[in-house]
Image (cartoon, helix red, strand yellow):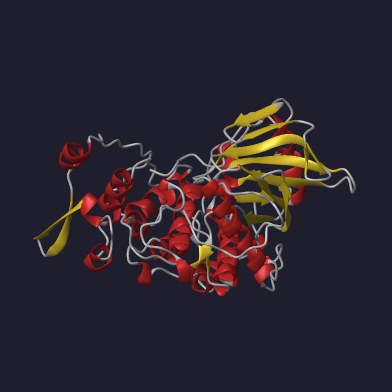
Amino acid sequence: MWCYNLNINISACSIAQQEERPGLKSSKNTSVKMTFTSNHLEICKGTLLGDHYEVEGFLGEGRFGIVTKCRNKKTNKVVAIKVNKSDPEILQQAKMEIFILEQLRGLDADRCNIVKWNDFFIDGDRICLNFELLDESLWQYMRYRRNRVLPVREIRPVLFQLANALSHLGSLGIVHADLKPGNIMVCPIKVKLIDFGFASPASIVIPGDCVGTVGYRAPEVMIGSLFNEAIDMWSLGLVAVELATGCPFYPGKNHYDVLKFIIQTQGQPPDHVLDSGLYTDHYFINDNYNGQRWTFKTERQFQDETGYQSKDTRCIRLKCLDDLERILRGCRRTENSQHLFFSLIKQMLALDPNQRITPSEVLHHPFFSPGLSKSSPCTDMSIATDGCPFKKAWFCRRFLPFRRSFSFPLSLIACS
């Protein structure tokens, strides 16, 4: 979690509280649940936040607080209000999020595929963030899709738009640090990146900080090494695999399990990456065995030291990353772009962050070349929307009618 003393003017309020926020969980049903109660926070339907935001429902909850659906009583506009708990550490994290959102104000939210932030206000001793109200998360969309997978031609515009979002964040030196399907919102013809609660300027990241969601964390984060924007590209690679297979690639609630899955599939990170980790010796033994300085601890060794019994929760078990291409080829009709898609995934999931592909390089990858898109002539927008599964007519007809009957988590895994 980011803990920095930022000089952000939060008006004359007595806020002094904040808590670590690993993620959101959805409320059961925005039209049924009448009250949200937790430590430091109790909100009911009909509650007035600030001067004129009336709570109409609950969109998600987490350790930071809750996201509510509110109507502006003056303008009748419906928005999403993130209400942070009045806890010391959550205050600091909310200040950092405001700082990041202020940096993003100069960007066109629609063209940059990021959520539009309107403003913030103070409600008693709580910081409230006002965002545009979006539709549903990519996690929910995939969960209720009939076969839970997308063909490569539909994954292409999603990856292009997310790489576009990361490219703009990178131009400002910002690390999102929590990219996952639950933080990607789908709307007609586009996706948008949300939740900047873990975001930070890359220039002030602290090695060892526990950021993001376990199953989407880059190896350098788990071992406590210095990290940068490359961690977002790792997460995007895992999202790409999940869209293609319907399953999280490296699921787990413990870093040991996730590192074990990575090593079994891709091998272990290079020694120079492991050398820089604050927590490397928690998972590895420095024994200079078989030509490498570090050896991953066996399940028995780790259990004897920590008491934790390793669990294998994977739906897909691969001996090497190349097996993924064979699985994708075998489970559906071969597409001419499939090999390029797999090539892109391998570059996104490079174990050495310095070798990982950058967002700008992704946007120019052959996977997005005009020859693979039906639109002609091809522009950035045609690449970003051609084959998009969230076409307006289909989206409204097939997906939105189910919105009020769904319950879905925006974050499944807490910080270990």
Q: Position of residue 159 (x, y in %)?
A: 55, 60
The residue closer to the viewer here, 158 or 368, is 158
**Residue 374 appears in view:** no
Residue 143 in the figure: left or right of residue 381? left
Q: Position of residue 287 (x, y in %)?
A: 10, 58
What residue is shown at x 69% (from left), y 51% (from top)? 13
Residue 231 in the figure: left or right of residue 7? left
Residue 396 in the figure: left or right of residue 385? right
314 lies above or below 237: above
What residue is shown at x 50% (from left), y 71% (from top)? 365
Q: In the displayed image of the protein, which residue is found farthest to the right?
A: 74
**Residue 412 appears in view:** yes
* Quarter-of-image position of residue 394: top right
What residue is shown at x 36% (from left), y 64% (from top)? 350
Q: Position of residue 226 (x, y in %)?
A: 36, 65
* Quarter-of-image position of residue 34: top right
Q: Position of residue 269 (x, y in %)?
A: 27, 61
Quadrant of the drawing holding the C terminus? top left
The residue closer to the viewer here, 11 or 81, is 11
What residue is shown at x 28% (from left), y 45% (from top)? 256
- Total labels: the figure holds 0
The residue closer to the viewer here, 334 or 390, is 390
98 lies above or below 171: above
